[in-house]
Amino acid sequence: MNASDDIDMRHEVEVELIALVAAMAESQPVALTVRQGTALPSGPFELGHRSLQEGLRGWVRQQTGHPLGYIEQLYTFADRDRIANGQTRRTISISYLGLTHDDGAERKQDWRGWYSYFPWEDHRSEPPPVIGHTILPQLQAWAENGGAVARETRWHRTALAFGFDGRPWNEELVLQRYELLYEAGLVAEALRGHGGGHEAPLPGWEMLADHRRILATGIARLRTKIKYRPVVFELMPPEFTLLQLQRTVEALAGRLVHKQNFRRLIEQQELVEETGQTTAETGGRPAKLFRFRPAVLVERTAAGTKLPIARA
Amino acid sequence: MNASDDIDMRHEVEVELIALVAAMAESQPVALTVRQGTALPSGPFELGHRSLQEGLRGWVRQQTGHPLGYIEQLYTFADRDRIANGQTRRTISISYLGLTHDDGAERKQDWRGWYSYFPWEDHRSEPPPVIGHTILPQLQAWAENGGAVARETRWHRTALAFGFDGRPWNEELVLQRYELLYEAGLVAEALRGHGGGHEAPLPGWEMLADHRRILATGIARLRTKIKYRPVVFELMPPEFTLLQLQRTVEALAGRLVHKQNFRRLIEQQELVEETGQTTAETGGRPAKLFRFRPAVLVERTAAGTKLPIARA
DNA sequence: ATATGTTATACTCGTTTTGAGCATAAAGGA
DNA sequence: TCCTTTATGCTCAAAACGAGTATAACATAT
């Protein structure tokens, strides 16, 4: 395919598969982790693997005992060079996003709440205080510290990402926010190679290598995608009430939605159908149980246009 | 990061970077190709490359003389095993989508129209006859040929992908359509390992390896993305008329849009601003010239929600 | 100079889709 | 029976959409 088979040194590449597996646990979005929550399940792509996806499923099952259902590719990146006894080697990391319904049966698995890693991302009750208390002043200082040129840009990016200066909060910008904080040296990962002894990072657990960035990427992807594809259902039990569905969406988006309008939206889109039964377990008036309309799984792959199409 | 450094054979992996570079040429969407239109620019990821993107830019410049501006990652896949003198080796292909404005200056470059590869995707004037004449009957036959179970599924997928049985045409399903045709053995690429001598493939140029699939992936991505992100502008000259903008969108989407409503959409979204000048080069009444509002480039990264958010 | 063809723009109108609430129903517990 | 709580139904105005109709402003052919 290309004239490169004569040079062999450059093939010294390791390919790593990394999985962000998401689920819901009591209205909290959680991720499947290993090593006490400091890493995502991962492993090298091997010759024995039939495909990237197969390799990934294998590693996740092996490391967490959890079988994967729905998965989609997230992003591929090249890790910075690594030195191994005088040799340079590179790692290509291919990350995936998996969605599961955690039936709570197996408790060996180490699920951790998203917002333990990103405390500034959960706006369901109210904007997290850490934003005003710590992030705002620190980023402000960071912006000031920039050269005459950088100053403007830095503050502009900050204001946009966090909704300062009267701008609205946009829950989709998870990755931008993380990268901004990283650049500003406010997260633990950014302080690593710097001889330690730096200022304290923001609240929020650290992770190995770029795993936390992958988590941010996955959250962002999911927050975007639930708006135009029926992916939430991968996280739901077979039957559920509309409020449960709403709580899940809210957990993912990190913000509250208008109940009646949410219900209208779901119903008009014909995503669900009543099972005919109700449950009283929610307290208050019993709620109808719904199930996902299976036809949608196939049909809705075809989404709707937004262009003002002309008639034939 | 994982306990795998003791086994070395499995690192026998080559990483390839592939670029789909898109531009507009006289109301036709085109892709930058090499080898007389049979391949996309590509090359191995090497130790000397600072990053995946840098490596890609290098190969494209080297092979086509074209410098890249905007690029985004498309998809990563593992090619089937390859045998090289008794050895098994794998290739990981990382594909990117680049958008440029082809100013027509450099003619060494080999730009080819998208629809030469996918004649069934251009519905601007009318649904391409090949769909009714050839694709419909062939896919119908293919569906019939399936087992009792497969039959239904096959036809259902077909109808959905191509808008048969009264279903609407959905321009975003480029990849699904290509994969369907591939599965049904109707494109040249699918007939390769089969000892030749098969039936004739559909009209539409063949490409090397999976390059045509990558092209399909990129077209699909672009058709989806123009609806919620202001990416079209990467393909436009600095100043343009609204009709030119419309023609570009139509070329990408492969369908016509309602002129007045398109204009209303663009203006209400405040994507553009008048330059104050007009051009008479369009024939008819002179058109105002517009330019992209640069602020949008930054701000619109933040798109709008679709969830019925509750107020604070 | 006038009629024609072509593209550019302004507006109109009826239909949907949103955003925000008000109101009512159906349980359980005090 | 009266709250409290969650579930659902409905209303209303504002904004966005889909489809046209009506003009305006040029170039060219009579």
Image: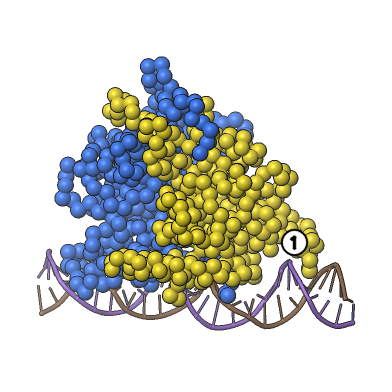
Chain colours: A yellow, B blue, C brown, D purple
Q: Compared with residue A286, is residue B190 higher up or lower down, i.e. above or below?
A: above
- Mark 1 lies on residue: A288
Left or right position of A9 against A23: left
Neighbours of disc 1 within 10 Å: few (<14), some (14-19), many (20+): some
- Residue B300: x and y, percent? 39, 65
- Residue A259: x and y, percent? 64, 69
Q: Nearer the viewer, residue B20 or A256?
A: A256
Residue at position x 25%, y 34% in the image:
B35
Left or right position of B120 against A283: left
Badge 1 element: strand
- Residue A194: x and y, percent? 41, 52
Left or right position of A126 against B62: right
Residue at position x 50%, y 27% in the image:
B6
Q: Nearer the viewer, residue B134 or B279?
A: B279
Residue at position x 23%, y 38% in the image:
B63
Residue at position x 24%, y 35% in the image:
B36
Residue type at the position of mark 1: Lys
Which of the image's four quarters has the C terminus of chain A? bottom left
Which of the image's four quarters has the N terminus of chain A? top left
